[in-house]
Image: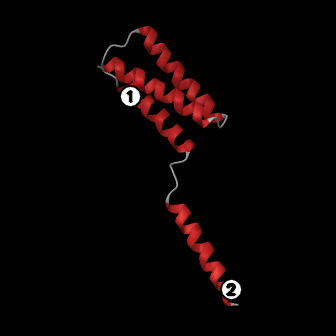
């Protein structure tokens, strides 16, 4: 009986310890990056050349498609590329 209690306590501590160190899931990061890029694009005051604007919009759209297909690493990459282009055009 004490072995079962000890084993239960050990497993409970192991589960709690692992739960504390979880990174942010990729799906959440993907969604946040898409929202940030879309918001920045809507709120941009500077003039962006039409080619860059088209590329940024295409990257955001491609990120949304990757998100729908649960390709979160690709989604994050595309959304971050859109953010980088937006920030470089605002400078």
Q: How are the colours assigned in the image?
A: secondary structure
Please tell me in which quadrant of the rendered image residue 85 appears: top left
Coordinates of residue 40 in the picture (x, y in percent)? 38, 28
Residue 40, numbered circle? 1
* Above/below status of 31 relative to 45: below
Q: Residue at x 68, y 86 (%)?
A: 3
* Residue receiving disc 2: 3
Marked residue nearer the N-terminal end (2 or 1): 2
Q: Residue at x 58, y 24 (%)?
A: 62
Coordinates of residue 6 in the picture (x, y in percent)? 63, 83
- Quarter holding the C terminus is top left
Residue 85 relative to residue 64: left or right:
left
Q: What element does badge 1 sit on?
A: helix
Q: Residue at x 55, y 47 (%)?
A: 25
Q: Residue furthest front?
A: 3
* Above/below status of 89 relative to 20: above
Please tell me in which quadrant of the rendered image residue 86 appears: top left
The number of numbered discs placed on residues in the rendered structure image is: 2
Residue 35 relative to residue 26: left or right:
left
Q: Residue at x 57, y 32 (%)?
A: 75
Nearer to us in this view, 39 or 22 = 22
Q: What element does badge 2 sit on?
A: helix
Q: Nearer the viewer, mark 2 or mark 1?
A: 2
Q: Are marks 2 and 1 in contact (CB under 8 Å)?
A: no
Coordinates of residue 64 in the picture (x, y in percent)? 58, 30
Marks 2 and 1, Cα distance to the nearest angstrom?
Answer: 58 Å
* Above/below status of 54 relative to 70: above
Residue 72, numbered circle? none
- Quarter holding the N terminus is bottom right
Q: Residue furthest bottom?
A: 1
């Amino acid at each position: 009986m004490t072995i079962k209690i000890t084993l239960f306590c050990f497993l409970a501590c192991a589960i709690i310890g692992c739960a504390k160190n979880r990174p942010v899931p990729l799906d959440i990061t993907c969604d946040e990056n898409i929202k940030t890029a879309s918001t920045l694009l809507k709120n941009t005051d500077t003039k962006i050349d039409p080619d860059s604007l088209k590329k940024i919009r295409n990257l955001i759209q491609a990120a949304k498609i990757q998100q729908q297909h649960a390709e979160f690493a690709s989604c994050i990459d595309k959304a971050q590329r859109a953010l980088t282009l937006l920030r470089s055009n605002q400078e």
